[in-house]
Image: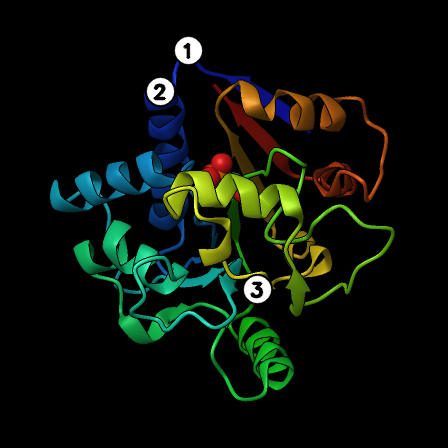
Amino acid sequence: MQKLTYKNYAAMSRAAADIVVATVKAKPNTVLGLPTGSTPIGLYAELVKDYKAGKVDFSKVTTFNLDEYVGLDVKHEQSYRRFMQEQLFDHININPSNTHIPSGTAKDLNKAAKEFEVKLKESGGVDLFVLGIGTNGHIGFNEPAAGMPAYTHVVGLAEETIKVNADKFFGGDMEAVPKTAVSMGLATIMQAKKIILLSSGESKNDAIAKIESEILTLDCPGTVLHMHRDVTLLVS
Ligand code: PGA
């Protein structure tokens, strides 16, 4: 595992964009794994800038997002589908049918999660996965627990995650935050060929310190990234 430290959020976001752009240039039909949340907003803004400046072509790119809230319509202002449209997809030349986000509204969520895994496999797998990390060390919505499903699954959100997301995105209203989500599992994520994890701000210090301690524990799911051979932490 490699760690790169940046002087601020803007520099980290730019560096992450450089990695994504270089990946897409080297392989135009790249499959990207993507996160939502506050952390990747700067990265997505840089990618839009690069696209508008003619520096990158997303026409053959495929994307798979980590997770989605259960029960929010795709048009809901806090759905992760809407987030991705507004932050990235609506502003670049990606083929909409190449963008995949787990369904949080399917009648049978488990069946939809299995189909999502099949699609991911059929795509050839993720070339580059961009991750964020929760203050509690979660990646995707794989919350600290004694055990968890390996692949895409329905999951209950940790109290801490509900609180953090309420404050950041739901005007502090914990009741408004869905209590369940559909998330890729840790095994889904670990099958990516290359992973970069973005972390910005002091609230993530504890999670990053646990990863750096090199002790594997599902109490901090991000620590399992040590079992992958090509992971870079981008920290600011
Ligand atoms: P954040 O969330 O980017 O909003 O900090 C990251 C996460 O919870 O994984």
Give the residue at mark 1: 7
Residue assigned mark 3: 125
- Mark 1 crowd level (few <14, some 14–19, many ≥20, 10 Å Cα): few
Whether residue 134 sits left or right of residue 77 in the image: it is: right
Label disc, if present, on residue 11 of the rendered structure: 2
CB under 8 Å between discs 1 and 2: yes
Q: Residue furthest left?
A: 53
Which residue appears at 84% of the width and 39% of the height? Answer: 217
Does residue 95 lie above or below 167 as drawn? below
Q: Nearer the viewer, mark 3 or mark 2?
A: 2
Q: Secondary structure at mark 2?
A: helix
**Amino acid carrying mark 2 in the image:** Ala
Instruction: Give the image's coloring scheme.
Output: rainbow
Q: Residue at x 52, y 69 (%)?
A: 70
* Residue 40 in picture, x, y percent from top left: 40, 40
Quadrant of the rendered structure where residue 14 is? top left
In percent of width and height, residue 191 lies at: 67, 57
Q: Is residue 51 left or right of residue 144?
A: left
Q: Is residue 50 above or below residue 108?
A: above
Q: Amino acid at mark 1?
A: Lys
N-term mark: 3 or 2: 2
Kind of residue at badge 3: Gly
